[in-house]
Image: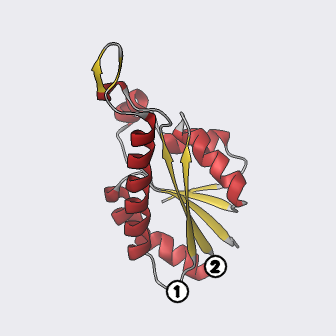
């Protein structure tokens, strides 16, 4: 049914919770898994050492983001069945949901497979949901596991 599964990875806990189901889906369809991680393109203000500038350079920030994405990709691949082909893509974008949609276009994915954070209704209302935003903006089907 699906040949290319786009799987956004954002944290180690979500990787651990969802890889078993993603493996089952990929094995059933003989599909390739494409991991994507979206990073903020500029350092957050929390890095600022004063009100006049950042305490970390853009280059250092990007290097740190690349290292973190590699860690996530390695952890995700380690939990994926080894017979499943996979690749990874790290994107810098100010909006995570738009970055995921952009990645789906770049990789020509068939479906976006996302984990639910299972927030309460009130929590989802105040915090929002990247999954919900992807569902609203993607032209591809989004499978929530």
Q: Number of numbered discs present?
A: 2
Task: Name the spot of residue 12 as percent of width and height, x first.
Answer: 33, 58
Relative side of 69 to 51, left or right? right
Relative side of 22 to 61, left or right? right
Among numbered discs 2 and 1, the one appearing first in the sequence:
2
Does 91 sit above or below residue 31? above
Asked if residue 117 can be seen in this view, the reply is: no
Q: Which residue lies under the disc numbered 2? A: 29
**Residue drawn where x is 38% and y is 47% of the image:** 64
Q: Which residue lies under the disc numbered 1? A: 83
Task: Name the spot of residue 72 as percent of width and height, x first.
Answer: 39, 60
Q: Considering depth in this image, is 88 or 116 the residue closer to the camera?
A: 88
Disc 1 residue crowd, few under 14, some 14–19, many 20+, Cα 10 Å: few
* Image quadrant where residue 142 sits: bottom right
Does 119 sit above or below residue 23? above
* Image quadrant where residue 17 sits: bottom left
């Amino acid at each position: 049914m699906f040949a290319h599964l786009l799987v956004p990875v954002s944290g180690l806990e979500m990787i651990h919770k969802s890889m078993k189901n993603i493996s089952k889906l990929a094995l059933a369809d003989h599909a390739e898994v494409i991991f994507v991680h979206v990073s903020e393109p500029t350092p957050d203000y929390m890095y600022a050492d004063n009100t006049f500038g950042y305490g970390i350079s853009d280059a250092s920030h990007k290097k740190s983001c690349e290292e973190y994405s590699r860690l996530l990709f390695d952890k995700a691949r380690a939990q994926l069945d080894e017979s499943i082909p996979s690749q990874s893509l790290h994107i810098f974008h100010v909006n995570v949901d738009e970055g995921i949609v952009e990645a789906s276009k770049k990789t020509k994915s068939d479906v976006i497979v996302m984990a639910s954070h299972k927030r309460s209704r009130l929590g989802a209302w105040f915090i929002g949901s990247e999954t919900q935003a992807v569902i609203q903006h993607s032209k591809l089907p989004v499978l929530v596991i």
